[in-house]
Amino acid sequence: MKLIQATLLGASLFALPFVSHAADLQDAAEKRAEAHHDAAMEKAEADYKMAKEQCRGMEGNARDVCMKKAEADYTTAKGDAKATYKGDKARAKTVEDRAEAEYKIAKARCDALSGSAKDQCVAEAKVKYHQ
């Protein structure tokens, strides 16, 4: 009986470093995922600022459409970073946010039109983006 207890105790002590190592690996993986998320968010911010600067040189409806596109790209980039970090639930939200952003772009393009052409453009955008 003492031999069995000694064997079990030895096996437990032998396995202890491996359990600790697995926890360390998990912590390292979480830190890498967080660092990747933070870097993606910083890139999204930088890209958004650059896109807004490019839009500043435009006028009228072209500028409005450009700004909506910059906002849509920013929303998507942030959503993708969050989805990669948080998982499927965040990914579904990103898809919804992107569809909403695409609708806003289409609607901004319609603002260049007037009368029934504008009404038809908005109606088509609503159908296309399920609004």
Image (cartoon, rainbow, N blue to C red):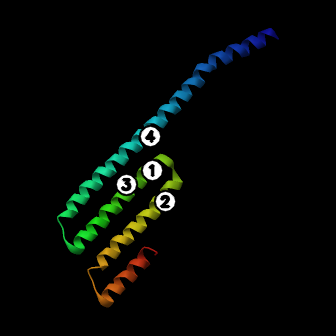
Q: Which residue is mark 3?
A: 77
Give the percent coordinates (x, y) of residue 85. Answer: 47, 46
Instruction: Please tell me which of labels 4 and 3 falls first in the chain.
Output: 4
Identify residue type, mark 2. Lys
Instruction: Please tell me which of labels 1 and 2 falls first in the chain.
Output: 1
Q: Is residue 92 above or below residue 23?
A: below
Q: How far apart, in angstroms, are the residues tagged by discs 3 and 2? A: 12 Å
Asked if labels 2 and 1 touch by Cβ distance under 8 angstroms, the answer is yes
Q: Which residue is mark 1?
A: 82
Query: Residue at (44%, 40%) from the top-left corner?
Result: 34
Which residue occupies the foreground of this view, 118 or 20?
118
Q: Which residue is mark 4?
A: 34
Give the percent coordinates (x, y) of residue 59. Answer: 19, 71
Give the percent coordinates (x, y) of residue 33. Answer: 45, 40
Instruction: Please tell me which of labels 1 and 3 falls first in the chain.
Output: 3
Instruction: Specify the farthest residue to the left.
Output: 57
Q: Which residue is mark 2?
A: 93
SS at mark 2 in the image: helix
Which residue occupies the foreground of this view, 103 or 22?
103
SS at mark 4 in the image: helix
Instruction: Please tell me which of labels 2 and 4 falls first in the chain.
Output: 4
Identify residue type, mark 1. Lys
Residue 76 falls left or right of residue 6: left
Asked if labels 1 and 4 touch by Cβ distance under 8 angstroms, the answer is no
Q: How far apart, in angstroms, are the residues tagged by discs 1 and 3? A: 9 Å
Residue 23 falls left or right of residue 98: right
Q: Is residue 28 above or below residue 116?
A: above
